[in-house]
Amino acid sequence: MADVTLIVDGKKVTAPAGTLLIEACKSAGIEVPSFCYYPGLSLQGACRMCVVKVEKMPKLQTACTTVITEGMVVITDSEEVRQSRKAMVELLLGNHPLDCPVCDAGGECELQDMAFSYGAPESRYTEAKNHREEQQWSPVVYFDRPRCILCYRCVRVCGEGMDVWALGVQNRGVSSIIAPNQSDHLECEECGMCIDICPVGALTSGAYRYKTRPWEMNHVGTVCTHCGDGCKTTLGVRRSDTGMEIVRGDNRDKSGINNDFLCIKGRYAFDFAHNEERLMQPLIRKNGKLEPSTWEEAFELIGRRFREVRDKDGGQAIGVIGSTRTTNEENYLLSKFARAVLKTNNVDHHRSADFPALAAALHGKPGKTATMRDVLTAPAILLIGNDATNQHPLLAWQIRTNVRLRSAKLYVINSAEIKLKKQAAGFALLPAGADAKAVAFLSGDDSVLDSLAAAGTARDAWTALRDQVRGEQNLVIAFGSELRGADIEKLAAFASTLTGAKLICLADYSNSRGASDMGLYPDLLPGYEPAASASKFQQEWGSLPAEKGLTLPEMIDAAKDGKLKALYVVGANPVGRLGIDPFLLSKSFVVVQDMFLTETARIADVVLPSANAYEKSGTCTNTCGDLQLVKKAGEVTDCKPDFEMIVRIADAMGFDVRGLVPFGGGTHSDMGQTRGAQSGEADRHAVWLEAHNLEPKMTPFDPMAILDEIQRVVAGYDVSRVNLLAGADQHIEIAEGGAGAIHKPELIVPANDGLFSSGTLGRYSKTLNSVMENRSADVEVAAD
Amino acid sequence: MRFSDEFETRFSEMITHYPTKRSALVPTLLYAQDEVGYLSDEVIAELAGRLGLTELEVRNVISYYSMLTTKPRGKYNVQVCTNIACMLRGGEEILDHCKKKLGIGHKGTTEDGLFSLEEVECIGACSWAAAAQVNYDFHENLTIEKMDKILDEYKKKGTQ
Amino acid sequence: MAYLVSHPDEVKVVSKRFGMGATDIDRYLELDGYEAVQKALGMGPDAIINEVKNSGLRGRGGAGFSTGMKWSFVPKQSAKPKYVLCNGDESEPGTCKDRLIFEHDPHAVIEGVMIAAIAVGAHTGYIYIRGEYRYLSVIMQKAIKDAYAKGFAGKNIFGSGYDLDIYWHGGAGAYEVGEESALMESLEGKRGIPRIRPPFPAVVGLWGGPTVINNAETLASVPPIILGGAEAYAKVGTPKNGGTRLFCLAGHLNKPGVYELPMGYNLKKMIYDVGGGIPNGRELKAVVPGGSSTPVLLPEEIDIAMDFDSVAKAGSMLGSGGVVVLDDTTCIVKFALRTIKFYQHESCGWCIPCREGTDWLKKTLTRFHNGGGVKKDIDNIYYLAENMLGRTFCPLGDAAAMPTMAFVKKFRKEFEDHLDGKPCPYERAGATEPVLA
Ligand SMILES: Cc1cc2nc3c(=O)[nH]c(=O)nc-3n(C[C@H](O)[C@H](O)[C@H](O)COP(=O)(O)O)c2cc1C
Ligand code: SF4
Ligand code: SF4
Ligand code: SF4
Ligand code: SF4
Ligand code: FES
Ligand code: FES
């Protein structure tokens, strides 16, 4: 759009035509105060805080509703303007309780700030204030009416942003009030967006209320550990008896791929970290019972048993199951540990999407995967399968926001009428399980049309949809785990016929993609290098096991047959999640690293209490391939990060951990010598470090040492470290990796989590549980 | 739920008058209230369903308009105007008299459910002040004596 | 049923059919009914708009904007349907004129809506009537039905090939809904919260289409203009203030009632002659000249012409035609309180200054009138009103602020007389003197 030039406070300001005055001022560094204005939400003109003087206009104008015009002359700060704003603050304070000292928003309240700037030192108003009791609207949302300044942000973010429309305005005049959709309580997605956006302390969260004061917290920006979308979440932490307690989650810096958004899980479901069932001590099975023990005893026992099995029965008698929530560094380390130390290719994890197939399809064809940010700006999006609103809340938010603010076209192909249908320009209902046919149809195979039309979307509508999709440029295609193996190949081929189309493969857990990228597969090493022909890793890791590895179900079978003597489970609950009969594992020596006594931990011989993703540092990769930094926020003493435990076990097995983690100071040549066996590796590492201006890490427990190695050896991961450390997300090109693989489709088991569940982890979140209970209670009432 | 045939005829005609169904909401609420006596949860759910709205949206609207109520009222809703023109001609005294005579206050309902009382804003009878409405009927040029008789007549009508 | 009055100075244009049974469509036809619209069909849009412009007709809803000008703002071409919306929400205290029109001459309103629609190229018109006027809704719904039955409304009206639907719509108790953008919200089935302007309704109105919104009296004035010509109409009033208007005389008067007088009629004469003067031998204390939102005038300020410009020059507004007369027994503090109580009750609550301002004014004035006032309250009341004025989202805030400021400015002494726990000097046993015989 053409640019418009205006004068603000004597400064020349240029902005695109159509820009709102308040935004034009902001772009020139002139902050105009506002309560009701919120970028991206509909305009209100309600609070009158943003008034400015516009030349030739008799009255003050609201900068939030005024569109700039050429030659406009604006004064944002004058006696008249200040007086007007001051009066608004006075009026608000007139009826506002003065309970700032106990208010959750105290210290972060926009009204407080405004009172400070435009201040009303003496109160002109001596009348009694209107008092009302605080109300609980849901397990998450509390409302303190007298504090509400009626800016309507909550109403809009819930309606326009979330498309939930659970909040309304009722009554009128001074009796106006924000009201929940069920008269006295809320039935909604519990995202807490309304709480976050509330400029004052009127909406507060059950999770945080009255726990602490903002200035008593430290704030750590990290990545949500729930679904695969990778929202940045800022955790507020505070010292406690057992370390650092996480007391709040939000996204105050709004710099993440999620901008304003967090769902209930990213915002409130950090509370699993402080569940009283949290394991605080290693447990060792003695006389058939898990008994508390010491770390030394545990590591000694594990080291001894693993070594015995490896040396006696060979590496193929050991199985390793990794995690979809641990960091990339831990996953890489585990993959390496399995191969280099345990000498086994029996490595797997709970697969919820087929990344190896995507890697195979895109091998050597970069630029074909989309970032989460792309979803916000793409002109068109095609969603095949998946109920993003429930399973990928951020993705759904991006889609909705894009459709709403940029008029993006959304096409949805699904076997259910998912909520996003409302935003869709085209929707086709699939017969259950026919997702692959839809891909065939898109690719031009009309023979499937009859069976596709069976669910009710007519043949014409299918064809029209295909025509529309084919006409789109820079289309983002997101697909759920309904598509696997060869279907993904076919979809990628279809995408390559469109200009600029990019793919997103949707996986369920926070680091499902990382687990996959880091080679938690029997047949694939990090970067989708086939294990069978991985000369690169031979060089890096030393000799690799020759035997073909077992998949997770195969390991269970082997255990049943007594062939799998030991099983090492890191941050996973296969018994609980994949419905494995625990009896099948009774003959194996099972080691589990977990936070809780899960179904898998319960049958283990040794259980090691682990730290979670909020209690450690590293990186993780979201489902789109956006790499982000994970920062340590909370801490529970006596729990260890999986990283440290893996290193300690290697050490206990008598393995020189320098062969596992490239650490140690001194000169480069010295590092080379002390590395011994893997000659050449240290040099390569040292050369790489130097070339990237990085220092060698000092301890074997520093995950950054492995990040160095990942960036050096895993194809696609050589992104800017500076940007990464600065908190920016970096896109990983899956295409630059190895050849990938086509696996049996049944190895993929969707997590089937919804908004209020999150695998095993979710079961330990009181917030999620209370929402679930609340819901079923509602349903029961309704059924009466 | 069932409304009268008259209501249904009017409703089905009215929704054809607008490009959006919800446009019929405000007058429809008033007609529904006239039939049921108040806007019960059932009425709200029914109209929300018919107009493609959430119940929340319907409640938001109801709570805005002063004639709409979600609570039952007396058979005769006595609405006394005390706004400026009526105030100058005894509106407040007439309201006080009604309060005393009926033994109820603003927005109160008599125990027999016959009368409700409301102090209302200008009802467009300023040149014929003081004025009151009983349900939709206007009573103008009121004095205390006249009001007293009017209430008696309604009482008689209501208890017959 | 409202009562009819008359006075020799009246010029009956809008009220000419009052009391003549014109609710009956055949009777209306006998009395020149539906002739103007047929003439308008022959004139075409530009000629109609010119005629109305030249008539000097200004909006009778309160703001007094030139009606012809307003119509000319409607774009000729529009992707979305255009609409005409008749504002019959009449709720400004002191005003009871539209009620008479609906009661006695509903077809005149329909005809006015039709002419407006033809002028701007709209094919749908709505007549919004406040919910309290149920009996008028019944009359209007019947009138519309009769017009359809005769082929005056609906498809191909009067065989002209022009399609024009006319519908009734009802409110449910809300003064703010009379504000034009809130009116559209209400018609769309929503809370009566005003819209951001610009865009103005003439460009983006009902369901996004260009919409002409006029007061019922304004629209009822249109057929006579078309039929009798702009010049004749303009001549009745004063320059730039064409025609007549219905003045609602109320309050302390011997002969209150709704009188149709030429624009520019002398206010003093209106009170003492037309209205029959002040009852009980009392003195005039003040006049609210155009509905409760207009600043009060003192007895020495009333020798003025009642047209938009003259009243504005006197520091008030012609407003909606509600002339409320206060005699010297009236407590101005109480009157100010009752006025603000109304605006507090009717504020839609959307914006801070009006929502909070009216509430604090009401609270302060209540305490003040009850004898709890302190000196700084008087300045605070003024300060509050002053800080609402011009800063609210819609003019309701102004409507509350303006009279309040005038009361304090013009009657400061009376406010001071209430200070320090003194009882209201006007409260007596029996309070209001009976003004009705
Ligand atoms: C608070 C408020 C209430 C209003 N109420 C009415 C009303 O009841 N009837 C009316 O015709 N105009 C009312 N108006 C004026 C309308 O906004 C609008 O100006 C008018 O209907 C336009 O018609 P006109 O140009 O024919 O006067 C009101 C304005 C405000 C600000
Ligand atoms: S928690 Fe989310 S869904 Fe629920 S009311 Fe708030 S914004 Fe709406
Ligand atoms: S609850 Fe908060 S966000 Fe919602 S209107 Fe009130 S102040 Fe604004
Ligand atoms: S959308 Fe996913 S990543 Fe974002 S907060 Fe929710 S669970 Fe966490
Ligand atoms: S001034 Fe503000 S609060 Fe008052 S009625 Fe208008 S929009 Fe509503
Ligand atoms: S920010 Fe502009 S009116 Fe609220
Ligand atoms: S003031 Fe009572 S009817 Fe107008």
Image (tube, coloured by chain):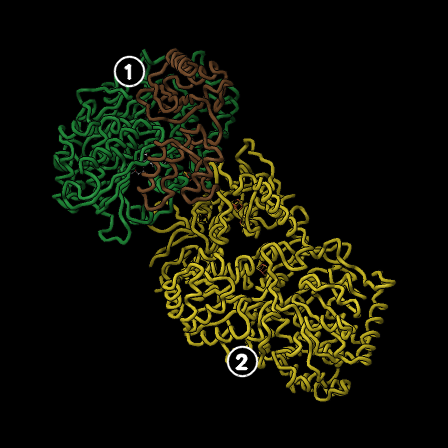
In the image, the chain rendered in green is C
Counting from the top left corner in percent of width and height, residue A593 is at 75, 66
Amino acid type, label 2: His
**Residue C286 occupies quadrant:** top left
For residue C63, which numbered disc appears in the image? Answer: none
Q: Distance of mark 2 from mark 1, alpha carbons?
A: 96 Å
Whether residue C413 can be seen here? no
Q: Return the residue nearer the eye: C404 or A467.
A: A467
Q: Return the residue nearer the eye: C167 or C114.
A: C167
Q: Is mark 1 within 8 Å of ligand 7?
A: no
| In the rendered image, the vertical position of residue C291 relative to residue A500, given as above or below | above
**Does mark 1 fall on the same chain as mark 2?**
no
Say left or right for C146 vs A154. left
**Residue A102 occupies quadrant:** top right
Say left or right for B89 vs C19. right
In the image, the chain rendered in brown is B
| In the rendered image, the vertical position of residue A466 relative to residue C206, given as above or below | below
The residue at which mark 1 appears reads as: C254
The residue at which mark 2 appears reads as: A363
Mark 2 belongs to which subunit?
A
Amino acid type, label 1: Asn
Question: Label 2's element?
Answer: loop
| Mark closer to the observer (2, 1) | 2
Mark 1 belongs to which subunit?
C
Say left or right for A35 vs A225. left
Counting from the top left corner in percent of width and height, residue C20 is at 18, 23
| In the rendered image, the vertical position of residue B160 relative to residue A607, given as above or below | above
Counting from the top left corner in percent of width and height, residue C270 is at 24, 22
In the image, the chain rendered in yellow is A
Q: Return the residue nearer the eye: A690 or B32.
A: B32
**Residue A357 occupies quadrant:** bottom right
Discs 2, 1 touching: Cβ within 8 Å = no
